């Protein structure tokens, strides 16, 4: 795993757990966000004395400040391992997915959050399931198990099978894929995950278009099925392929925005700073 800055993900909702973490929570406890001012007898902690409120009370009651607990949240990564994720151009797509998952695992641990991961192609991979928990070695687990993964299968319907394994309470969920799925499949998955905070992470490789010849004979290969076809490249065909690629991106963006978030697009190698910037922009 490359040495990169930690990912600072920020959520617009408050986790309800009692486990201390880095996010503003809903329950009372030690934190930096004022919850209310209460009588000392209701919260017997003189360290939180509110001197101004106490002095101004005509009944001479002693008041203390009550804060919200900074709570931990659960970070879940769902990884598409269908055949198209084995594409190798300027980067190895599966290696990029591994980098995304391992960096999120490390960042979650440093933030005091739980981390979980589920991988699936046509069916869920039960050998690559990590239930969410605080785990300092989660990034090592990711690297170890991803080194044994071989992308295969014509689709990623197995990700739907992962949904029941997720906690019922709201989580931050990353769906890592190239989203070479049938129209409507992403919407179906996002609908099943609608009570979670979902970030689609769309993996792209510039070589998919840049490596094509301007003219002459070329082989176009279906990355899911492996089937190839000889074609004579020309300007019209190249523009048609570019239009289809642009339409694919619009379909992913439309489905993502329908359920609350725009996708985070990784063009080539993964940069943690760009994902942090994504969260900063969506919180404004």
Image: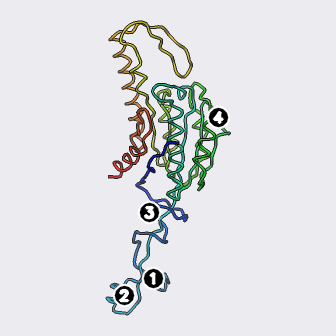
Marker disc for residue 47: 1
Callout 3–callout 2 Cβ contact below 8 Å: no
Sequence order check: which comes first, mark 1 or mark 2? 1
Marker disc for residue 54: 2
Foreground disc of the pair 1, 2: 1
Residue sitting at 35 percent across and 12 percent down? 214
Residue at disc 1, secondary structure = helix
Label 1: how many Cα within 10 Å (few below 14, some 14–19, many 20+): few
Residue sitting at 40 percent across and 26 percent down? 206
Sequence order check: which comes first, mark 4 or mark 3? 3
- The total of numbered circles placed on residues is 4
Sequence order check: which comes first, mark 1 or mark 3? 3
Question: What colour scheme governs how the chains and residues are painted in the rendered image of this protein?
Answer: rainbow
Marker disc for residue 24: 3
| The residue positioned farthest toward the right in the image shown | 127
Marker disc for residue 148: 4
Callout 1–callout 3 Cβ contact below 8 Å: no
Front-most of residues 181 and 207: 207
Residue at disc 2, secondary structure = helix
Spot occupied by residue 145 in the image (x, y as percentages of width and height):
63, 39
Sequence order check: which comes first, mark 2 or mark 4? 2
């Amino acid at each position: 795993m490359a040495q990169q800055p930690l990912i600072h993900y920020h959520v617009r909702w408050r986790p309800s757990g009692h486990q201390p973490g880095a996010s503003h929570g809903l329950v009372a406890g030690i934190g930096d966000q004022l919850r209310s001012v209460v009588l000392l007898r209701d919260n017997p902690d003189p360290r939180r004395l509110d001197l101004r409120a106490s002095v101004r009370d005509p009944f001479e009651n002693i008041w203390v400040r009550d804060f919200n607990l900074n709570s931990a949240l659960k970070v879940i990564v769902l990884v598409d391992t269908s055949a198209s994720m084995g594409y190798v151009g300027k980067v190895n797509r599966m290696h990029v997915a591994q980098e995304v998952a391992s960096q999120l695992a490390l960042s979650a641990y440093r933030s005091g959050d739980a981390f979980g991961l589920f991988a699936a192609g046509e069916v869920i991979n039960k050998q690559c399931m990590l239930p969410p928990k605080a785990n300092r070695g989660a990034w090592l687990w990711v690297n170890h198990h991803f080194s044994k993964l071989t992308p295969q299968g014509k689709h990623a319907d197995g990700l739907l099978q992962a949904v029941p394994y997720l906690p019922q309470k709201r989580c931050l969920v990353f769906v890592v894929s190239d989203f070479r799925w049938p129209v409507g499949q992403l919407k179906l998955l996002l609908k099943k995950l609608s009570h979670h905070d979902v970030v689609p992470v769309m993996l792209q490789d510039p070589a998919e278009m840049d490596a094509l010849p301007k003219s002459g004979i070329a082989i176009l290969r279906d990355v899911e099925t492996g089937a190839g076809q000889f074609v004579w490249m020309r300007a019209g065909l190249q523009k048609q392929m570019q239009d289809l690629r642009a339409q694919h991106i619009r379909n992913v963006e439309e489905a993502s925005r329908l359920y609350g978030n725009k996708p985070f697009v990784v063009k080539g190698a993964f940069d943690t700073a760009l994902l942090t910037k994504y969260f900063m922009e969506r919180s404004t």
